[in-house]
């Protein structure tokens, strides 16, 4: 990201805001007037404390902490429920590179430097005008197997070109700057339980705002294999005895604050036991039956861990994660975009193959989204500025595999020179809630009845 | 109504608690020396310390170089931790931490270690003096002017950020009927006039009051009318009838986890006003109060936990690991989570507990016993006693002591082969240090 660019600056400040603290606009200078407070703000202040290095489960929301482990155990022994995984591509992915109209002369005029040649990426079978970005070969493969539903231009009316605001809209499931609960969080508020924080899991060091609930607890877990308790110069049987001592040290105490510390000890010990299989398996990739890409980002390992957790019957319902890569490509777009899409797509292909090999594929649907697309016309620095409609994908064995909304073409752009949306994310959410999660969309998405539904599943 | 004073025995456990609540715990022998002074002498020594002396090894980074608090990432935090660990004026340093939480300013909004440390030194030098002076100085402190938009607040476009927090978080409290939205707007007007320049090399500089940017008109604040400016703004807040109760309750909460009895709160307010808003006498009265010694324990904030371990082990800052460990534990100094500071009721969860476990590991690691070489007695009582001595013989509960003894006996029982008999005592000793340092007893004080 170029440092001198106004928008990029805004983007990094937006992430800063999220990282830092509660009351946006109070402690830090406002990014723009009327900027929304991130969903989940005030749910639990710890949610916004920076945790730079890996730690396991942080629980957000109210509830009696001590009951969680039993609730998780109970939920785990129940019937296998459908799982929705949300993968966010941060920064606004360039839809006109993700699926590009290679032979379109207007596209070539708008993108004198950035237009991708016809031969670069595989053809898109549902619309012969389009080609997949070369880094998205894994998606093309899955699409060929009928496991990808493409939204070539997903967005909403009156698009907002602020990263912060548009992302907020997607996270809360409404074009409402004041809403502070996430759309998946509200779904869990209605259908989740008070004692299973794993039902809404952020694979992150902090809460993903789309999971911000108002009633039920949700959790975040950076990586399931990091929750271990070693000590210098302690191993073997003595280490086993040491770890066994955590439980009695966590026994009830009469002093209320000593008891608080004891409770934290006992809860941590219980979580340690639960996650022990992952800690032991991480060296061989959580016992994954497939090979995940090697990458510094942690994303492949997190997705491998997610598949392992699902295989271990941990009761996950909604999962949210941020994909690696920088998509706010105001400058030097070709490499940044190719790198980000490459590791993301290869990992998601591996994840899909992993689920298939473990017999879990029919239970899991993955939604890939970004806060907006980018300007049709390239800028002067080998990049593109903020746009409107963007790309979305649904991946899984159960998806219908038929495009939702057509590619609008680059001849009829909106007044800002951006791609027009041909599907509305709130309609997609409503359809997912009704068809995949078996929920009442009207109770989760404000004004759900006004958005067009589309058949997403086979 | 006189303030109650603790009348019970002032032994080592009480002296330890005083050093934890009013500082960062004892270095070996410190609690014993405090006992000899008696309660009043002990408290007086904290509230009236001599000149600052930093004892023990000088701080350095992972490469053995001196700290560069203005320049290197995280070194500002290490610079402060070093003072907490080595100071002979623990209460002054603890008050600095309290004011950092009270006037919570984050580098995220200031973006200058130099200005953050300047503010930190303000807390250090003014921390036990007049609160009116402190608030007035904070109002024009450059870091605060940047953090809460003080230099964006001008006659032509007033910014309410500081004016609101000054009342809501610093002096009066929300929802107490102390001020209205109109007072917020009028405070913002009174506070106009601060400016600064910006330079690509040094960042923000030349913070100054510029009358051209100040709204010189008449304002009405708390029903009083006048051509108020930034000094009046602080003064009006501190002289507000609802300020002493806010101040006393908030200050008390840093030292005692339960609310002060009504009579105590009232007496502390009277004391505070009669001493012309001096902080020291109020802190002194709290440190003498029976509730501090007879009441429940408190969870140590991460900074106190880390500095306390360093003090107990007489270890200086010799690694930068504390920065990421503190962050994992939920307290990154100079980066409070928001303008309301850290939430002291939420230090412990499954993530932060593991962070504290790792902090304990890092603290004891340099003393790790090598089981190939160290030959320790296979005697549970002796091993336990060594571990307690290692950590400065902290007072621990019988429950914890029994569990640690049980661990020791069970581990010794595993030592069936000859090599185990030789090696296990060292492993056990290492484990005892870890378990003790991260036990509920040492997480609280």
Image (cartoon, coloured by chain):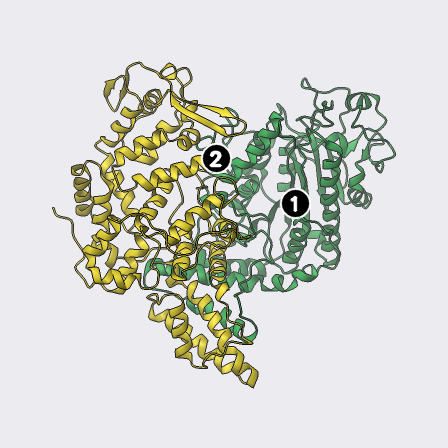
Chain colours: A green, B yellow
Q: Which mark is residue B438?
A: none
- Position of residue B9 measured from the top left corner of the image (x, y, whole percent): 20, 64
The reply to the same-chain question for discs 2 and 1 is no
The x and y percentages for residue B439 are 41, 64
Q: Residue at x 32, y 45 (%)?
A: B95
Q: Quadrant of the C terminus of chain A?
A: top right
Could you say which quadrant of the image residue B394 lies in? Answer: bottom left
Front residue of B41/B342: it is B41
Answer whether residue A371 is visible to the viewer in this image: yes
**Residue B3 left/right relative to A78:** left
**Which residue corresponds to mark 2?**
B112
Query: In the visual, does B27 lie left or right of A417?
Result: left
Q: Residue at x 58, y 35 (%)?
A: A173
Disc 1 target residue: A436
Q: Is residue A404 left or right of residue A165?
A: right
Q: Under tag 1, what secondary structure?
A: helix
Where is residue A441 shown, x and y percent of the image? 59, 38
Q: Quadrant of the N terminus of chain A?
A: top right
Q: Is residue B149 above or below residue B104?
A: above
Q: Nearer the viewer, residue B199 or A249?
A: B199
Residue at image x 55%, y 38%? Answer: A444
Residue A372's place in the image compared with B74, above or below, is above
Pick the front one: A307 or A238: A238
């Amino acid at each position: 990201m170029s440092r001198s660019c106004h928008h990029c600056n805004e983007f990094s400040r937006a992430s800063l805001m999220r990282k830092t603290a509660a009351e946006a606009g109070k402690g830090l200078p406002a990014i723009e007037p009327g900027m929304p407070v991130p969903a989940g703000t005030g749910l639990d202040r710890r949610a916004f404390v920076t945790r730079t290095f890996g730690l396991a489960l942080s629980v957000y929301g109210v509830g009696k902490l001590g009951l969680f482990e039993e609730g998780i155990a109970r939920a785990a022994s129940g019937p296998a429920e459908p799982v929705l995984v949300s993968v966010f591509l941060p920064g606004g992915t360039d839809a006109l590179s993700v699926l590009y109209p290679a032979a379109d002369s207007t596209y070539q005029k708008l993108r004198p430097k950035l237009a991708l040649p016809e031969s670069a990426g595989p053809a898109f079978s549902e619309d012969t005008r389009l080609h997949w970005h070369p880094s998205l070969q894994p998606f093309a493969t899955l699409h060929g197997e009928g496991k990808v539903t493409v939204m070539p231009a997903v967005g909403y009316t009156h698009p907002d070109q602020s990263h912060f605001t548009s992302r907020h809209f997607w996270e809360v499931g409404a074009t409402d700057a004041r809403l502070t609960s996430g759309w998946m969080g509200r779904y869990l508020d209605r259908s989740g339980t008070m004692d299973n924080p794993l039902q809404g899991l952020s694979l992150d060091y902090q809460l993903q705002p789309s999971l911000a609930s108002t009633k039920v607890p949700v959790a975040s877990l950076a990586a399931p294999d990091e929750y271990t308790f070693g000590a210098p110069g302690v191993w073997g049987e003595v280490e086993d005895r040491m770890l066994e001592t955590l439980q009695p040290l966590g026994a009830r105490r009469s002093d209320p604050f000593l008891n608080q510390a004891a409770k934290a000890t006992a809860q941590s010990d219980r979580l340690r036991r639960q996650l022990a299989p992952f800690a032991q398996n991480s060296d061989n990739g959580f016992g994954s039956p497939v090979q995940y890409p090697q990458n510094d980002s942690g994303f492949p390992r997190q997705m491998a861990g997610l598949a392992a957790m699902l295989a271990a019957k941990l009761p996950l319902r909604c999962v949210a994660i941020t994909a690696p890569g920088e998509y706010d490509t105001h400058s030097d777009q070709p490499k940044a975009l190719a790198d980000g899409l490459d590791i993301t797509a290869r990992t998601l292909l591996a994840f899909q193959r992993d689920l298939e090999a473990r017999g879990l594929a029919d239970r899991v649907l993955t939604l890939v989204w970004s806060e907006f697309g980018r300007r049709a016309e390239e800028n002067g620095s080998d990049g593109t500025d903020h746009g409107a409609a963007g790309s979305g994908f649904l991946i899984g064995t159960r998806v219908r595999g038929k495009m939702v909304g057509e590619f609008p073409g680059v001849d009829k752009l909106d007044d800002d020179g951006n791609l027009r949306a041909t599907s509305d994310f709130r309609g997609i959410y409503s359809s997912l809630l009704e068809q995949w999660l078996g929920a009442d969309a009207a109770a989760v998405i404000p004004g759900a009845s006004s958005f067009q539904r589309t058949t997403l599943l086979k | 109504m006189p303030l109650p004073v603790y009348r019970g025995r002032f032994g080592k456990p009480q002296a330890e608690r005083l050093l934890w609540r009013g500082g960062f715990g004892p270095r070996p022998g410190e609690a014993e020396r405090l006992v000899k002074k008696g309660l009043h002498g002990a408290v007086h020594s904290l509230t009236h310390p001599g000149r600052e002396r930093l004892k023990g090894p000088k701080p350095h980074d992972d490469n053995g170089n001196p700290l560069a608090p203005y320049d290197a990432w995280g070194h500002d935090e290490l610079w402060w931790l070093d003072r907490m660990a080595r100071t002979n004026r623990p209460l002054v340093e603890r008050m600095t931490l309290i004011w950092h939480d009270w006037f919570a300013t984050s580098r995220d909004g200031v973006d200058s270690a130099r200005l953050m440390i300047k503010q930190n030194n303000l807390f250090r030098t003014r921390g036990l003096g007049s609160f009116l002076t402190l608030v007035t100085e904070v109002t024009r402190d450059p870091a605060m002017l940047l953090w809460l938009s003080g230099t964006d607040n001008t006659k032509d476009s007033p910014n309410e950020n500081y004016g609101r927090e000054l009342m809501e978080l610093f002096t009066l409290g929300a929802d107490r009927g102390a001020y209205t939205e109109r007072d917020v707007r009028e405070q913002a007007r009174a506070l106009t006039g601060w400016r600064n320049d910006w330079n690509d090399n040094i960042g923000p500089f030349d913070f100054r009051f510029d009358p051209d940017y100040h709204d010189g008109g008449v304002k009405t604040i708390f029903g009083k009318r006048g051509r108020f400016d930034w000094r009046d703004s602080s003064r009006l807040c501190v002289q507000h009838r609802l300020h002493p109760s806010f101040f006393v309750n908030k200050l008390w909460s840093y030292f005692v986890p339960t609310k002060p009895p009504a009579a105590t709160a009232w007496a502390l307010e009277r004391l505070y006003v009669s001493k012309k808003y001096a902080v020291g006498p109020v802190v002194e009265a709290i440190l003498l109060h029976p509730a501090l010694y007879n009441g429940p324990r408190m969870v140590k904030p991460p900074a106190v936990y880390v500095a306390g371990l360093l003090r107990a082990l007489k270890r200086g800052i010799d690694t930068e690991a504390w920065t990421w460990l503190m962050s994992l534990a939920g307290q990154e100094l100079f980066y409070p989570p928001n303008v309301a500071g850290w939430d002291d009721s939420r230090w412990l969860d499954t993530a932060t507990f593991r962070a504290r476990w790792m902090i304990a590991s890092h603290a004891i690691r340099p003393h790790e016993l090598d089981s190939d070489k160290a030959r320790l007695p296979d005697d549970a009582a002796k091993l336990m006693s060594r571990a307690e001595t290692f950590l400065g013989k902290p007072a621990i509960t019988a429950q914890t002591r029994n569990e640690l003894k049980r661990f020791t006996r069970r581990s010794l029982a595993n030592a069936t082969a000859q090599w185990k008999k030789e090696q296990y005592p060292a492993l056990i000793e290492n484990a005892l240090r870890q378990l003790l340092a991260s036990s509920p007893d040492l997480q609280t004080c």
